[in-house]
Amino acid sequence: MKTPRYKYLLALIDWLFLNLTFVLALKLRTASRIDVFFSEPPFIAPEVIFFLLYGFVAVLIFHQQKLYKINVFLTAGEHAWRLIKALSLVLTGIALLSFFTKSDFIVDSRLALLYFSAFSMALFLFVRVIFFRSIFILFTNFRIYNRRVLVVGTGETARELVTRLGRYNPYGLKLVGFIDDALPEGHVVMQGLKVLGATSGIEGLVRQNRVNEVLICLDHGDHNALFNAVEIAMQSPATVKIASPLYRVIPERMFTDKYANIPVVDVTRYGQQMPHRLFKRGLDLFLATIGLVALSPVFAVIAMAIKLESRGPVFFAQTRMGKDGQSFRFFKFRSMAMGSNSDSEREAAVKAFISGGGSAGSDTKIVNNKRITKTGAFLRRTSLDELPQLFNVLKGDMSLVGPRPCLPFEYDNYKPWHRKRLSVLPGCTGVWQVNGRSEVGFDDMVILDLYYIQNPSILLDLSIIFKTIPVMVFGRGGG
């Protein structure tokens, strides 16, 4: 999928101006006599070398603050506010690194940091909020920059989007036509835009019409139709985005792009490439090993508490369904009395929950509380019973972050589109766990997992891991 060129350009501008303001701050400092540039090797001061690398971290911070979302950098107020937050985080990172490492290699002058703070805030507010934003809108107004968009669907969302873009379109979107399975090819839908073909022909139409972006706006009906359109569109070289009520849980729970105030969700799948998978596996092994070593005293205390309260093993092993529906042995700390694993009432409730799409506030963890031990109740409330899954991560059955593994009977009751959530390794935690697990229905839970699969990144993984900690502390985790 093609990322819009302006995002690369904006990221490059950010990196260059961050380094420019840092060099300027070093040149103006008075607390050091060290110059910035030399006539002999290494030619550049160590602080500058550091910031050439740290500048990439700063760009990632800008990304985390959504500064490359089109609806952010086209909105002056929110753009400025997020920019100030991002630069504050960049400055805080430099200060912390300098303090904890005690290294002059980072920066040897507080005055330099003060200069950097002032220069960067002023320069970026001008360059980004005033100059770049104005130039971008000017280019889109005069059609110097545009993105050719194919709209899938002719329902309410599609029509509302086209109507709004007809009134105000600073995004550079040029609509080329519609895709619809019910209307005949050539049928005029609105504003002179016609149906160009059916869903099955998306890939060919993208190439034929030089389409940059496919915007899927299917309103109602079968989720399978939505994901069928997504899968076909992703075979094309165009960027794929979803603006559909069926995907409403994503903008409700996460920050997304907006076109004319209508949320659109990226579908990239960049992360499915081999480099990402290798890096993710390396991160899993590293963090799981560190976690097991650091938490070994906690494991010992929990094991002792379980053994003292009730007879039976410390660990509870269960069959779960993993990547591509392959079964594996899933480990937890035992939280229930022995002989209480079977629960037909819970199974029936979960089947009904899945078949009906679930409802917000429903609880799939239906158990007889009398069977749960006192230690088990605490472990469940804090999700400490999930810690042995670090062994599953080391074995390669699971990842630290991903969709939660399901039980065999749950998998058997999944609809075809539900099973797409297990197209990657299941995780110890995931998007659903940190975005209101009991506040969304089953279908929405699956969509949250599919969003993760469609837009994976190491930054997203790390964000979910950090968000999981307060979820555990306040007793809302575990699955």
Image: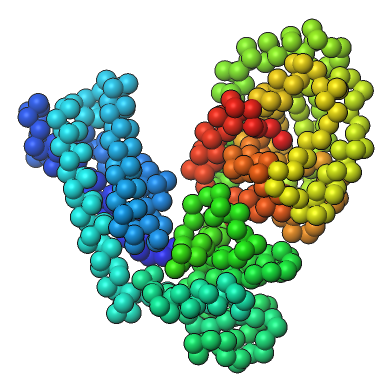
Measured as percent of width and height from the top left, residue 100 is found at 32, 21
Q: Residue at x 37, y 60 (%)?
A: 7
Q: Along the horizontal axis of the image, is 407 left or right of 185?
A: right
> Is residue 393 at all visible to an observer of this figure?
no
Q: Along the horizontal axis of the image, is 242 left or right of 55?
A: right
Q: Nearer the viewer, residue 40 or 372?
A: 372
- Figure coloring: rainbow
Vertical order, 188 against 327 (above or below): below
Q: Residue at x 53, y 86 (%)?
A: 190
Measured as percent of width and height from the top left, residue 44 is found at 17, 38
Q: Quadrant of residue 42?
A: top left
Q: Along the horizontal axis of the image, is 9 left or right of 227?
A: left
Measured as percent of width and height from the top left, residue 208 is found at 53, 84
Vertical order, 179 against 341 (above or below): below
> Is residue 127 at all visible to an observer of this figure?
yes
Measured as percent of width and height from the top left, residue 115 is found at 15, 37
Vertical order, 408 against 473 (above or below): below
